[in-house]
Image (spheres, grey):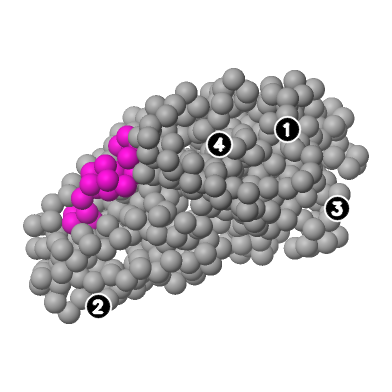
Amino acid sequence: MSKPLRIFLQGLFILASGLTSGGCVRQQPRADVVIVNGADPESLDPAIITALEDYRVVPALFEGLTRIDPKTAVPIPGLAENWEVREEGTEYVFQLRPGLRWSTGEPLTADDVVFSWLRLLDPLTAADYAAQLFCVKNGEAFSTNGITDASKVGIHALDRNRVRVQLNHPVPYFLDLCASPTMAVVPRKVIETHGDRWLQVRPLPSSGSHTLEVWRLNDKLRLRKNPLYWDAANTVNSTVEFLPVGSPSTALNLYERGVVDIIWDKDLVPSELLDDLKSRPDFHAFPYIGTYFVRFNTTHPPFNDPRVRQALALAVNKRRIVERIIRGGEPVAHQLVPTGVAKHQAPDGLIPDPDAGRKLLAEAGFPQGKGFPVFQYLFDSAAGGGAKVHAKIAVELQEMWRRELGIRMELRQLEKKVYLAAQNGLDYDLSRSSWLGDYNDPNTFLDLFLSNNGNNRTGWKNARYDGLIHRANLERDDLQRSELLREAESLLVRQEAVVIPLYFYLGFQFYDGNRIEGIHGNILGMSAVRTIRNKAMEKGRDR
């Protein structure tokens, strides 16, 4: 252990006796596996979740027709034991496993599947991910109030154990979509009875490997193995706990003291210690598809002018951000879709060029930044405040744009839930953003900026872009499809500069491989809770 790391940890241990971290240190039976999960989940409702913290918990509670193989990240059978593909890839018939039951004992049937998917599309649900089902016959029309008759949507129960899905066109990643947490199967009867308060029902019916035992905000979320889960025999833990810890110092302290077993985010360890921590055997890195970027609100002048957006993009020294702040070896990004995504041809992005940026800003009517209004940069807060990566990046961008373009930016830091609401409501000028791929295809990134996608959050609507994406979705030739998506991405990040990509993610996890097994770094960056096993707890060792 290096001297800086040793001194840092010694200082933390001095404070440890009084540290509770919102109730993290408790006199009660320890869970088999304890995980630092960042912020509290925004929700556990599959239809409305959007945050990474939600995505780590929800798949354990609610499963879809398929699920992701934790090693390869490819879709494998979930609640459906098999399926038949018909009509040249435009029709799927899923066969549910026999005897499926909710954790509360009631039968889980095809009607629950149909209800869950129609609920995702229902405009009253206001699901940001409703567009995932726009490939289904009449799915988009139903979601946008073009039709109101749900029976016309291509999702039907053929009997208690079979579901037929009719698509508008073949979708090469449709089985990946079926594994998305937003398309998980939820309890129809409970939701119909309790409406928006259904998550408060106890016991909460679960279709996944675990049930919800307790969720106390700012304290913990605890899951318990579901004995009625179809694959309970291969669920290797009894209890799993997620702690809402936002401070890197606190997270590392709890980990070093053995209070927690896993830290799933590099951002949840002190960045100044990263060089030392990366050399340890409990530091695990892996590639996964995710992008950190800046999002423009294109409805707010002067950011409704592409030249202004391009100017700001050209003035950003991305390598400086990666090397001075991120420090984990992440590659600089000039495109939105990460390198390594299947069947993707990356277009040319905007390479940093401050002189070209100043010229564009002058053409837009702001020579040397004169007359440019003061604007705000929105980012989310967490414990640790200015020490957090988002804040550091915000300060660096603020200085770059002041120095290179002569414009003034104010920083606007909001609590995570308020930040997300502001972004959704277009109550911002520029916003820190990120996206982690839901499946291994360029569409998981490029679909976001369709005019009617709930995850767009820029106010940008472009008929040409929409047309390119829709044509790509209909294209059966892989090369032609790839070229259409490449053209669409070029429009997004170069001609229109709706976003400024900064860097591509790398996956980082902290856990002792001698004690914890069943964690698999995959390109989606998502581990299956059901496969995580604490060997030390099984041997009865007191930690």
Q: Is residue 256 or residue 301 the one in the foreground? A: 256
Circle nearer the viewer, 2 or 1 = 1
For the image, the number of numbered tags is: 4
**At 49% across and 41% down in the image, what residue appears?**
10
Q: CA distance from mark 4 to mark 3?
A: 35 Å
Q: Is residue 47 or residue 516 the one in the foreground? A: 516
Q: CA distance from mark 2 to mark 4?
A: 47 Å
Q: Is residue 346 or residue 123 the one in the foreground? A: 346
Q: Is residue 196 or residue 98 the one in the foreground? A: 196
Residue 221 placement, left or right of 304: right
Q: Amino acid at mark 3?
A: Arg
Comes first in the chain, label 4 or label 3: 3
Q: Residues within 10 Å of mark 4 (few under 14, many from 20)?
A: some
Q: Which residue is mark 2?
A: 373
Q: Which residue is mark 4?
A: 256
Secondary structure state at the residue bearing disc 2: loop
User: Which image quarter: residue 296?
Assistant: bottom left
Q: Which residue is mark 1?
A: 32
Circle nearer the viewer, 4 or 1 = 4
Residue 147 is a magenta residue: no
Percent x, y of residue 48: 63, 55
Comes first in the chain, label 3 or label 2: 3
Comes first in the chain, label 2 or label 1: 1
Q: Which residue is mark 3?
A: 202
Percent x, y of residue 52: 55, 47
